[in-house]
């Protein structure tokens, strides 16, 4: 049994978004697989943007971020779901990660200039939906933003292993294909991987 936190990165609060259905399927699978589950809906959190390096390094996280930090600290596995917007994660999710993954919580700068990873021992699954076929994103665009999230954010703070699920052509897929993806996310949630 694992402690799972699902981070829903879709900035639209409307429940009819397929990303919300995917997150719900993942959560349902995790619960039925015997895991403890908490959910963070980024679209429902009010927080300011970071504007300076000094704020990121030295200011306290906003009150609205403290519950998210507590959930992430509690978790053994993170499920991060978001739509691909302009080749990357939506700005709201990026702003959330900047606020929550601060020095002192996610990493620590040592006196010699190196960073200590403070979130080691956690795994993650990233689920990205997109309008283009997933193989085009991987092959032509080289999945650059996914690689950046994995290497420059999650691995930087100690999260590993990191698995990924890319769901392409989301706007044109039919109900049968959507049901298959919901079933797939359910099974991934059961395994908490």
Image (spheres, grey):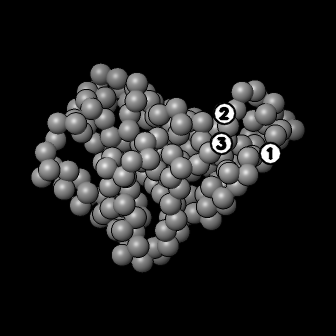
Q: Can residue 23 be seen in this view?
A: yes
77 to 60, vertically: above or below? below
At x 32%, y 40%, the residue is 129
At x 38%, y 38%, the residue is 83
At x 32%, y 55%, the residue is 21
Local secondary structure at mark 1: loop
Local secondary structure at mark 2: loop
Relative to 107, is 36 on the left or the right?
left
Q: In which quarter of the image is the C terminus?
A: bottom left
Crowding at mark 1 (Cα within 10 Å: few <14, some 14-19, many 20+): some
Tell which residue pokes out farthest to the top in this image: 140
Q: Mark 2 points at which residue?
A: 49
Local secondary structure at mark 3: loop
Tell which residue pokes out farthest to the right in this image: 111
Q: Distance between the residues labelled 1 and 3?
A: 12 Å
Q: Mark 1 points at which residue?
A: 60
Q: Mark 3 points at which residue?
A: 47
């Amino acid at each position: 049994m694992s402690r799972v936190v699902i981070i829903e990165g879709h900035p639209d609060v409307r429940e009819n978004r397929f990303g919300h259905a995917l997150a719900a399927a993942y959560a349902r699978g995790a619960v039925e697989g015997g895991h403890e589950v908490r959910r963070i809906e980024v679209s429902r959190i009010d927080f300011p943007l970071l504007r300076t390096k000094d704020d990121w390094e030295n200011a306290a996280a906003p009150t609205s971020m403290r519950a998210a930090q507590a959930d992430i600290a509690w978790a053994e596995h993170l499920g991060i779901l978001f739509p691909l917007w302009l080749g990357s994660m939506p700005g709201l999710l990026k702003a959330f990660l900047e606020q929550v993954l601060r020095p002192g919580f996610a990493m620590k700068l040592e006196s010699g200039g190196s960073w200590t990873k403070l979130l080691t021992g956690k795994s993650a699954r990233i689920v990205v939906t997109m309008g283009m076929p997933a193989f085009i994103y991987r092959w032509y665009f080289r999945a650059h933003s996914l690689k950046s999230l994995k290497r420059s954010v999650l691995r930087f703070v100690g999260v590993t292993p990191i698995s990924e699920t890319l769901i392409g052509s989301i706007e044109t897929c039919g109900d049968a294909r959507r049901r298959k993806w919901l079933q797939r996310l359910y099974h991934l949630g059961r395994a908490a991987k």
